[in-house]
Amino acid sequence: MDDVIDHSAIEAVYRREAARVLATLVRLVGDFELAEEGAQDAYEAALAHWPRGGFPSNPRAWLVNTGRHKAIDRIRRRIALRGKLKVLGAEAEIGNEPDVLSDDIEDDQLRLIFTCCHPALALEKRVALTLRVVCGLSTRAIANIFLVAEETMAQRLLRAKAKIREAGIPYEVPERERLAERLAGVLAVAYLVFTEGYAPSLGDAVTRPDLCAEAIRLVRLLDRLLPDQLEVAGLLALMLLNTARLGGRSDAAGELLLLEEQDRSGWDRAMITEGKALVERALSQPGRIGPYGVQGAIAALHADAPDFDHTDWPQIAGLYQVLLRLSPSPIVELNAAAALSMVEGPARALQLVDTLAAAGALEKYWPFHAARADLLGRLGRPVEALTAYRRALPLVRLEAERRLLMRRMQGEPPTRAGKPMVV
């Protein structure tokens, strides 16, 4: 063991293990708040003990067992809760988790996701609670995802936890015949976790591969459990196909790269092959095609193209029309307009985008203003394009995104080859 371990190294270990530690503690103590307190106490204990004694052989097991004992200590201090001691008395059985789980899903994180996604909770609360408790996203990051104030999101999370406690929602995976009613929420959670990894809403990193990998891991578990659910295959395909080009989204200096600028030779071809096979499965039954399967098909067309200019834009534009029928939203409309601009030109796309502008639904969404600026530039209207870019800048949260917009504003001509700004 190392004689000296600094706090940043311990923090890195805890950040990697925190979500699984918390999930197991929830199973052991049966209470969200108590589990969170135990996990925090375990982290503080690690900061105190590991610099002197070195990393334990199994940090996750150490954190879980320490968190469990800390939870017991807290209960002993709460006389009214003494009855829980019997529940907490057994030793935590923590070892190496298997990659493939049995049908009853012996995976605490997946079990916790299904608990958070109980139908007694509104869908938005299911997603927010799971992002916070299972995946470890901050309240601020989740608030940004949902475009609400941090305080508002904090109150929603408190109410969701209270609902689980008051309704006596069990910490379990439902029987197979009842899985479908919770699947939409679980998939929504995994999708948003992946999105936060692919395009973080906070921080300095251009991408967070750890979150992408965690989302993929959870969806792989679902796919093994429910191989007949085509939307699970579709979501897994979408994640793999986008992850395959994750490294190309920025250069060595950390600058965000547009799709047309990315070096496709570095894309993970094995991952693309797996993703394309999953797309075929997701689209194998025409009457059961869902939004994730369609998005996976769009990602497959991007991954298949030898370069930006030879992308099958007509087919992509057609798939976006299918997606609009299956899952209409302003963001899908915006993406559909961007694809259509490559087929029918920027003038028609700008009409659609201006219709969205009149509705006001995307006024605080910076890619909307950037896309509009791009279309205006391609139409030879630079003054209006500059105004649109200036509306986008205050809405950007990542410095890399800000620098990308500044490059577009300060001399990178958006009219070249009529290409949309696709990241």
Image: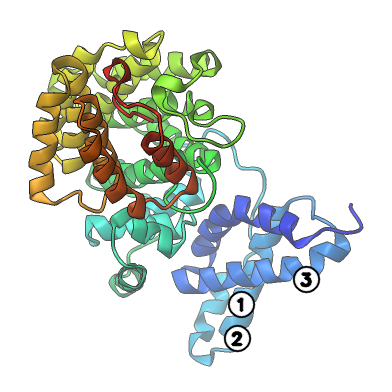
- The residue sitting at 32% across, 69% down in the picture is 168
Classify 17 as above or below 386.
below
Query: Of the residues shown, which amino acid type is indicated by label 2?
Result: Arg
Q: Residues within 10 Å of mark 2 (few under 14, many from 20)?
A: some
Query: Of the residues shown, which amino acid type is indicated by label 3?
Result: Ala
Of callouts 3 and 2, the N-terminal one? 3
Percent x, y of residue 383: 23, 39
Element at label 2:
helix
Tell me the number on the disc at residue 198: none
Percent x, y of residue 321: 13, 25
- Give the residue at mark 2: 76
Name of the residue lying farthest toward the front:
383
Residue 89 appearing in the image: no
Name of the residue lying farthest toward the bottom:
79
Q: Do the residues bearing badges 1 and 2 touch, measured as CB atoms within 8 Å?
A: yes
Q: Residues within 10 Å of mark 1 (few under 14, many from 20)?
A: many
Tell me the number on the disc at residue 48: 3
Element at label 1:
helix
Of callouts 1 and 3, the N-terminal one? 3
Determine which quarter of the picture holds residue 122: bottom left
Left or right side of 146 for 34: right
Classify 120 as above or below 167.
above
Q: Quadrant of the C terminus?
A: top left
